[in-house]
Amino acid sequence: MTPAPLPLAVSLGDPAGIGPEIIAAAWSNRRAEGLAPFFVTGGAGVLGAAAHSRGLSVPVERIARPEYAAQVFDRALPVLGLEDAPFRAGQPDEGGARLALHSLEQATGLALRGEAGAVVTAPIAKSELARVGFDHPGQTEYLAAACGLDQRDAVMMLAGPSLRAVPLTVHCALSEVPDRLSEDLICHRARIVRADLKRDFGIENPRLAVCGLNPHAGEDGRFGDEEQRIIAPAVARLRAEGLEVTGPHPGDALFTPRARKSYDAALAMYHDQALIPLKALDFDEGVNVTLGLPIVRTSPDHGTAFDIAGKGLADPGAMIAALRMAGDMARRRAAHG
């Protein structure tokens, strides 16, 4: 018999942001959404207050060990640990940043030790975390380091009902993108995307579409030569290895309804080339999933939204989608050992 998947570990995110309230809202919708059992690492008081701000009845119950989450989950939102912090919605501070960082570290550690089936991370404020010692560009890079991997081995994929998109360069200035691109980078990350689409998403033969960098995919070198010099050779190498890959495609045409039917994931050259179409199509259900890790990690594809925190306006759809995706991925990994 296949063992039951382990519960999911959810990091709290910044207490002053919308993370705690959308976690509470997701728990309130657990039955209707068919969510796998999850627990939050720290912040019981924060979660209770955030639920109250939305008018939700969410009992919070502290647990001593992750495995107790499944027993508690049907009646209360399980929270592991005693750490908490005072907070004011929309007003981040150092105490909240420390709680967010410790929650992220604990959730990640539990997954790495095999005590949680996945990590689901609520939104953080990178500038606030930097003040308390967080020296990574984002949570994706943090997860790579925590897993002992080079940053190039952790691949960000944004996934929604309409689109999966992978930015091959992420947290850098747009002016740096051409110098960061290489044939080896494109091939390396394309292989990771293909492998994880097979393992974690059940797609037997993933189809990848690769964006160009320049307008009209360079138009034969008139608007830039990166397509001819870097991207097309990478596509040719991947096809020679047996991957189903096409491109380079003009970025303004790759995300149309007809084009999206022709691939399972689009590989974009830079951050906004991937995130703009994903957020335009699937903002309330977009999930940030990190491929290439020995653990499962997902996150809602939005930020802390300090401006609406505590006002009952935040849509929990992306958090629910992140929890559902993490549960599905964890089940597939458990089934395949």
Image (cartoon, rainbow, N blue to C red):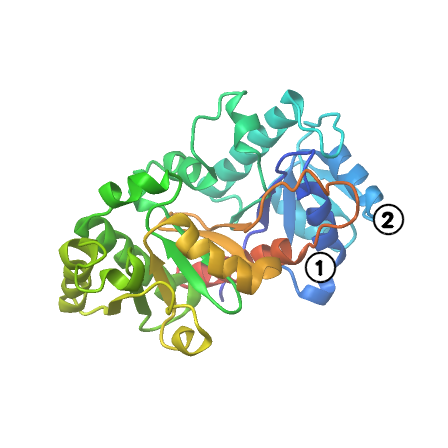
The quadrant in which residue 78 appears is top right
**Residue type at tag 2:** Gly
Q: Is residue 54 left or right of residue 202?
A: right
Cα–Cα span, label 1 and label 2: 17 Å
Question: Which residue is located at x 68 percent, y 38 percent?
Answer: 306
Where residue 119 sits: x, y (%)?
A: 52, 46
Mark yes or no: residue 113 visible.
no
Determine the residue positioned at 63% across, 21% down: 94
The residue at which mark 1 appears reads as 30
User: In the rendered image of this protein, does residue 74 appear above or below residue 101?
Assistant: below
Locate residue 98: give its quadrant.
Answer: top right
Residue under the point 50% across and 69% down: 162
Q: Is residue 202 above or below residue 271?
A: below
Q: Is residue 148 above or below residue 186?
A: above
Q: Quadrant of the C terminus?
A: bottom left
Disc 2, SS: loop
- In the figure, is residue 41 to the left or right of 329? right
Q: Which mark is residue 55?
A: 2
Q: Position of residue 7 (x, y in %)?
A: 59, 51
| Tag shown at residue 238 | none
The foreground one among 285 and 281 is: 281
Q: Judging from the image, what secondary structure is the residue with disc 1 in?
A: helix
- In percent of width and height, residue 9 lies at 58, 45
Query: Where 335 sits versus 226, above or below?
Result: below
Residue type marked 1: Arg
Query: Which of labels 1 and 2 is toward the front?
Result: 2
